[in-house]
Amino acid sequence: MSVSSTLVPPATGPSLAERLFVPANFIANLAKNAQLLAASILLIKAEKTALAVAVLVVANAIPTVGLSLWFGRLADRFDRRTLCLVSDVVSAVAALALPLWMLSGAPVNAGIYVTNFVLAVSAALFVPASNAMIKERVHADRLGAFNARFEISTQAAALISAAVGGFLMKAVGIEPVLYFNAVCFVVSALLFFAMGRKPAVATVEVTDAEGKTTTVVAADAGTPVRAPIVKISVLFALVLVTVTLSNVLNPVFVLETMKASEFEVGLVDAFAGIGFIVGGLFYKKIAKLGNFTIAIGAFVLCGLVTAFQASFGLVGMMALLGVGAFILCNAAIATRTLLMTSISADRVGRVFGAANAFRVAFAAVATLTLAQFADSQNVEYAFFAFGALIAGVAIIFGVLLWRTPAERRAVSW
């Protein structure tokens, strides 16, 4: 497949939407994950088990699994910027509702489950809509570099949220953090609004191997015809599984096993956030290896590091979590790029919606299983099982993707 002529010239630099997208995504994910952390700490203090947090994760997974595919189809039919704005506004209202619920004297646990359920519904809309916006607003020749920044903003927010939330909860309490989360969602909405309306669609003429020329959306110029989307989606899901399990097991280890405070929870995850950011900056140095090789290799290494994360005390967890996050970031960027470049622009919403439903269900089942294992056995053993899960899935699907010539070509970009 080759591009024979360009009807609309490629962008020479980042557009306004591209420049605003990363901070908007970071702020929204920071608020979402800080909200989940605050809710988790409230439940851990009340119930003193990992299972209580796992139940919250499963409850959050229900609307995501049930609605993501439908929301993905909406994202392929309606204006994606508007859908992102709706998601942020609903999230801001839900984040504000929890501290008001607590002030009213209503049962705290009920408020946690209700408000986080609404946040999960909102996130189920945000994921396919925001990913579809990337395809329509970021030119194909800038997609790889943008995905690196986008993935850093998403996962670093998930990891840094524990640091920011832990520090703030120790300093001012949980209720002010919940108000802070609501403000963050409002700021994200304002940034999406500032991106402006959907631009005109850039198109190119593409000539296939048989000499036939067709006009396609510019973002689809390099899209493989028969890419193994389902198998790539499993690897894409593994990133969220890893982050979710870390967010559940790490606080349990720090608070219950090490008998430390919320401050140490934040300190541990600060190392993860730093590792993730440095890993994203490192990605361009190894990009020539190919996204498939980077993804499989990084997942296997991450699994090995994760297995020993709780074996050397609090200091050991900080060091290994930083290294693991550094490695995971490269896997996350590689799998996102593999998936994004495998989809045509008119199907991005539904594919990411389906992938999001699957990855959240996968994360919920893995979290519930390992949380029960941690409560009944030992948190350190749960981390060994955690590491084996990451490495095992990566090896299995690496072999499945590589065993046929067609799929080997599709993932060797």
Image (cartoon, helix red, strand yellow):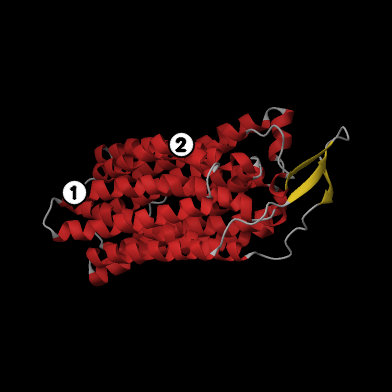
Q: Which residue is mark 2?
A: 70
- Mark 2 against mark 1, which lies toward the viewer? 2
Q: Residue at x 39, y 64 (%)?
A: 186
Horizontal and vertical percent position of residue 353 = 49, 40
Q: Residues within 10 Å of mark 1 (few under 14, many from 20)?
A: some
Cα distance in 3D space between marks 2 and 1: 29 Å
Spot the residue most to the top: 404
Q: Residue at x 59, y 55 (%)?
A: 198
Tell how many labels.
Answer: 2
Q: Residues within 10 Å of mark 2 (few under 14, many from 20)?
A: some
Mark 2 or mark 1, which has the lower sequence index? 2
Residue type highlighted by circle 1: Asn
Horizontal and vertical percent position of residue 261 = 25, 63
Instruction: Give the left or right position of residue 51, taking residue 132 as reference.
Output: left
Q: Residue at x 81, y 42 (%)?
A: 206
Q: Mark on residue 109?
A: 1
Horizontal and vertical percent position of residue 147 = 60, 54
Mark 2 lies on a secondary structure that is helix
| Image quadrant occupied by the C terminus | top right
Mark 1 lies on a secondary structure that is helix
Q: Is residue 313 among the parts visible in the rendering?
A: no
Spot the residue most to the left: 105
Residue type highlighted by circle 2: Trp
Q: Is residue 4 among the parts visible in the rendering?
A: yes
Spot the residue most to the bottom: 171
Instruction: Give the left or right position of residue 164, taking residue 277 as reference.
Output: left
Quadrant housing residue 382: top left
